[in-house]
Image (cartoon, coloured by chain):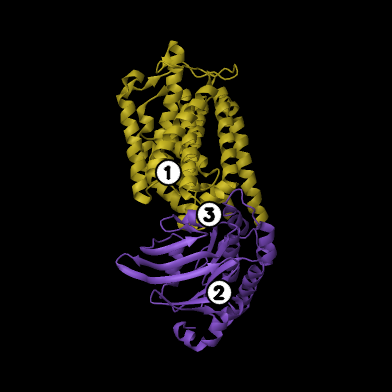
């Protein structure tokens, strides 16, 4: 029985990865090239949800403000790309860039800085206050970018073309799909390392009882803050990829409903697991796509469906194999 | 020289005062007990030492440093390892993870405790190192709680009701462990009610009642005043 569970736990992710690798070819064969863009979107949101998972699933921090970091990452990439195209300097100091690696690093830095500041203030609270403070900061950033006319304001910022990477043809959706897949896998690898490191164990302990951890000498604020910053950086990285996928950045990326979607992905897929949030993203976006093609009132079906799934698969879809 | 020293400590839960005048000392390498009936302030005293609640008056010093006002994690990092009442291990972490997560928070200090040494002290934990904390028996959880405290390499270990609710055979094992620690020169403050065992393994004793220290003495004094002390320590 235990062997069967172990085999399922290994076989399912391997099969899913094989399917993902083959997807551009299968989509071509099926005459459905749009599937590649849809799957790329799923992976990017899976990355964002997985980033939230570090705060939520590992650290027990229910943040309703992660869309802010996702948006900051997107704007960091978008703004640098725009300045590169115009040949101007950002703030009169920083040259633009159309290189994906540079813009992803900028996104990590900007979203990490935002998370460091917001986390330093918000983590002094807990429970419902923490949820509301993260939401308030996200909405502040949302309205800041709405008012930022230099970068499109409410209308958002269009990018002429995707960022460059090692001379690859990034206009090709399949190429961008594989680049995103590599980034997602690298991020999930980092998450797995974190979860099993002493840092991850301490976060797990804090999630179970912060006072108990303090009583054994752990500066819990420092660990929670670090988890929040890493989590924000991951969301920012996803934002930079999304900006490239759609060649568009808008304040809507920072809206609280985006944070809500990331939370739903975690609950659906399994917060606290490595693959759960990504699985949740695939499930949620997949259902949205299928139902939206079926009826314009797809939300009426999706809502109850999500409730049923959460009730049927307690602990998330990622834990199905463990119960087999 | 005293390692831990409390003088005239007072503390309250909101408007309700729990400690009125607690004074005690623990010297280096000493095993000291804190006895008293339920509700007399033993655990409150420990919580106040650990910074889990704030003393409103009096002095608490550890290795000469004032503990009042310090957060719990700072107190623990100064070198006090707490084995709390009710054990309170981390149930969804394995035995090994429970120990590793809390190990060596003081950098640059010569640290005598390691995983191997904890497993040597408690072979049962070695056998169950991959088991989740929640699946251990009460006695094993207590061993894990002690091991977890030792992994912080403390100068002083505080055991709050470490044998409460355990089977006699497990209690014996816990007492044996405390004797081993004593032989290694570990300073220990024990909160318990088992006068007969404590008289044998500890050096000095304090009895508290209604938030006040009412009796203090050595094990020889305890042997002399045993009947009097027993009146204040229900068992």
In percent of the image, x 44 and y 34: which residue is there? Answer: A289
Q: Secondary structure at mark 3?
A: helix
Specify the label residue A264 is tagged with: 1
Give neighbour class at mark 1: few <14, some 14-19, many 20+ (Cα, 10 Å). Answer: many
To which chain does the residue with label 2 belong? B
Say whether residue A301 is visible: yes
* Viewer-nearest of discs 1 and 2: 2
Q: Nearer the viewer, residue B39 or B189?
A: B189
Q: Position of residue B231 (x, y in %)?
A: 45, 86
Provide the letter of the chain coloured purple.
B
Distance, label 1 to label 3, CA atoms, is 39 Å
Give neighbour class at mark 2: few <14, some 14-19, many 20+ (Cα, 10 Å). Answer: many
Distance, label 2 to label 3, CA atoms, is 25 Å
Q: Secondary structure at mark 1?
A: helix
Q: Confirm or deny contact between disc 1 and disc 3 (CB under 8 A).
A: no
Q: In which quadrant of the rendered image does the N terminus of chain B lie?
A: bottom right
Provide the letter of the chain coloured yellow.
A
Q: Is A166 placed above or below B192 here?
A: above
Residue B132, quarter of picture:
bottom right
Same chain for the residues at labels 1 and 2, yes or no? no
Q: Position of residue A47 (x, y in %)?
A: 51, 36
B194 left or right, relative to B121? left
Residue A250, quarter of picture:
top left
Q: Position of residue A315 (x, y in %)?
A: 49, 52
Q: Nearer the viewer, residue A205 or B194?
A: B194
Which residue matches tag 2? B163
Which residue matches tag 3? B77
């Amino acid at each position: 029985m235990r062997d069967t569970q172990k085999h399922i736990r290994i076989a399912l992710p391997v099969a899913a990865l094989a399917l993902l690798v083959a997807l551009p070819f299968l989509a071509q064969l099926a005459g459905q090239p749009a599937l590649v863009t849809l799957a790329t979107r799923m992976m990017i949101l899976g990355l964002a949800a997985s980033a939230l998972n570090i705060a939520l699933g590992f650290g027990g921090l229910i943040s309703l403000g992660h869309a802010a970091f996702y948006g900051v990452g997107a704007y960091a990439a978008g703004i640098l790309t725009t300045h590169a195209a115009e040949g101007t300097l950002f703030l009169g100091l920083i040259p633009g860039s159309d290189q994906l690696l540079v813009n992803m690093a900028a996104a990590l830095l900007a979203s990490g800085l935002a998370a460091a500041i917001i986390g330093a203030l918000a983590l002094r609270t807990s429970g419902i206050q923490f949820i509301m403070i993260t939401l308030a900061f996200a909405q502040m950033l949302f309205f800041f970018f709405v008012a930022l006319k230099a970068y499109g304001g409410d209308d958002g910022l269009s990018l002429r073309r995707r960022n460059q990477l090692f001379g690859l043809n990034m206009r090709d959706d399949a190429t961008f799909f594989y680049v995103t897949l590599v980034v997602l896998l690298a991020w999930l690898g980092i998450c797995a390392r974190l979860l099993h490191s002493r840092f991850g164990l301490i976060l797990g302990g804090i999630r179970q009882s912060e006072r108990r951890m303090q009583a054994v000498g752990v500066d819990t604020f420092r660990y929670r803050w670090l988890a929040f910053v890493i989590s924000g950086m991951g969301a920012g990285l996803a934002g930079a990829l999304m900006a490239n996928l759609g060649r568009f950045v808008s304040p809507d990326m920072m809206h609280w409903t985006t944070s809500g979607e990331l939370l739903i992905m975690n609950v659906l897929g399994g917060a606290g697991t490595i693959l759960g949030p990504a699985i949740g993203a695939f499930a949620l976006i997949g259902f949205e796509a299928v139902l939206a093609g079926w009826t314009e009132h797809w939300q009426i079906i999706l809502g109850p469906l999500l409730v049923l799934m959460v009730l049927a698969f307690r602990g998330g879809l990622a834990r199905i194999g463990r119960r087999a | 020289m005293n390692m831990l020293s409390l003088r005239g400590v007072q503390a309250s839960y909101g408007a309700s005062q729990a400690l009125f005048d607690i004074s005690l000392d623990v010297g280096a390498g000493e095993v000291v007990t804190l006895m008293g009936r339920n509700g007399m302030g033993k655990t409150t005293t420990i919580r106040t030492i650990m910074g889990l609640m704030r003393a409103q008056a009096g002095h608490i010093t550890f290795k000469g440093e004032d503990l009042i006002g310090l957060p719990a994690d700072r107190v623990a990092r100064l070198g006090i390892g707490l084995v709390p009442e009710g054990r309170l291990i981390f149930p969804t972490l394995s035995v090994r993870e429970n120990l590793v997560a809390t190990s060596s928070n003081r950098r640059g200090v010569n640290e005598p405790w390691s995983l191997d040494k904890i497993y040597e002290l408690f072979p049962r934990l070695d056998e169950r190192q991959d088991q989740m904390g929640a699946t251990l028996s009460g006695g094993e959880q207590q061993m894990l709680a002690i091991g977890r405290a030792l992994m912080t390499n403390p100068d002083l270990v505080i055991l709050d009701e470490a044998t409460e609710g355990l089977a006699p055979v497990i209690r014996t094992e816990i007492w044996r462990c405390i004797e081993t620690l004593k032989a290694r020169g570990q300073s220990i403050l024990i909160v318990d009610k088992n006068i007969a065992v404590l008289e044998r393994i500890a050096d000095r004793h304090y009895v508290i009642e209604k938030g006040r220290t009412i009796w203090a003495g050595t094990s020889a004094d305890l042997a002399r005043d045993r009947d009097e002390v027993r009146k204040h320590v229900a068992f």
